[in-house]
Image (tube, rainbow, N blue to C red):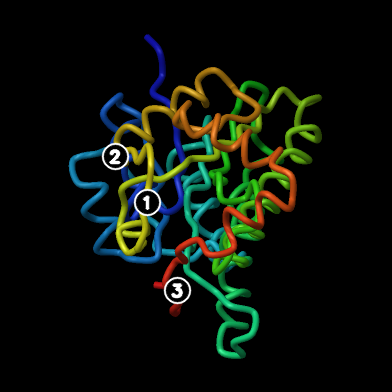
Amino acid sequence: MTKPLRVFITGASSGLGAALARHYGAAGARLGLVGRRLDGLRATGAGLDARLYQADVRDAAAMQAAAAAFVRDVGVPDIVIAAAGISVGTLTEMAEDAPVFRAVMDANVLGLVHTFQPFLASMPPGGVVCGISSVAGVRGLPGGGAYSASKAAATVYLEALRLEMKARGIAVVTVAPGYIDTPMTRVNPYAMPFRMTAEAAAAKVARCIRRRRAYAVIPWQMAWVARAMKWLPTSLFDLLFEKAPRKPRGLPT
């Protein structure tokens, strides 16, 4: 009889992280769910074989404690998914946005490190760690400097980690979604082509993990958009995006 997967997921209070928890939970996985909002974690974990850990991925000590508790109670995870993140508009010219820049970078980049580090030493060959990046990291988008920079950094960090883990047989999977219908995107004042439900996105992420994909953009239509954006000449990119609608500014929630 096959043992159930052990899956540790951050950002599980809502959005993609919660959808991933439901996806794996429906298949009988034993879950470790991390989030900042305990009420959201309880809603996600209801009816699932889940341990709940209220923690912020920016807090390395809290993540170490959550990881240690999961290993003690469930075992070393087969899959670790870093789905937590912050998306908010920022402007460098505004002094009050400086701490917002730090919060976004800490959550979206260092949050990956804090999520993976406690498990890597004990994870056996065959394990998978997955980081959620974004198409927004392909080019710098006006009004989203912190978010675009953080996701570009996340992609490059995950690439380096993938090479470091190859000799140990641990797969590092980078998934860069386009638009997902979550509370994070519903405030966007612009069209969001190829927007996916959180459930559809979770199924696609799980497929990438199962196939141990090194890097994938989802959905496939957005992969073509990402390729086009990456290779646009700078002058044409500037012309097309200088006046693009911008994500609302504000404090991260």
Q: Nearer the viewer, residue 156 or 93?
A: 93
Distance from the alpha carbon under mark 3 to that under mark 1: 17 Å
Q: Nearer the viewer, residue 192 or 29?
A: 192
Q: Nearer the viewer, residue 33 or 12?
A: 12
Which three-letter amino acid code belongs to the residue tagged 1?
Ala
- Horizontal and vertical percent for residue 172? 65, 33
Foreground label between 3 and 1: 3
Which three-letter amino acid code belongs to the residue tagged 3?
Pro
**Element carrying mark 1:** loop
Which sits earlier in the primary sequence, circle 3 or circle 1? Answer: 1
Q: Nearer the viewer, residue 83 or 241?
A: 241
Query: Looking at the image, which residue is at 40% across and 13% down?
Result: 2
User: Mark 1 = which residue?
Assistant: 12
Q: Residues within 10 Å of mark 1 (few under 14, many from 20)?
A: many
Foreground label between 2 and 1: 2
User: Mark 3 = which residue?
Assistant: 252
Q: Is residue 182 left or right of residue 222?
A: left
Distance from the alpha carbon under mark 3 to that under mark 2: 22 Å
Callout 2–callout 1 Cβ contact below 8 Å: no
Image quadrant in which the N terminus is located: top left
Query: Looking at the image, which residue is at 57% across and 83% down?
Result: 97
User: Mark 2 = which residue?
Assistant: 197
Figure quadrant of residue 148 = bottom right
Which sits earlier in the primary sequence, circle 3 or circle 2? Answer: 2
> Is 29 above or below relative to 8?
above
Image quadrant in which the C terminus is located: bottom left
**Element carrying mark 3:** loop
- Horizontal and vertical percent for residue 208? 51, 25
Figure quadrant of residue 198 = top left
- Horizontal and vertical percent for residue 202? 37, 34
> Is 57 above or below relative to 211?
below
Which sits earlier in the primary sequence, circle 2 or circle 1? Answer: 1
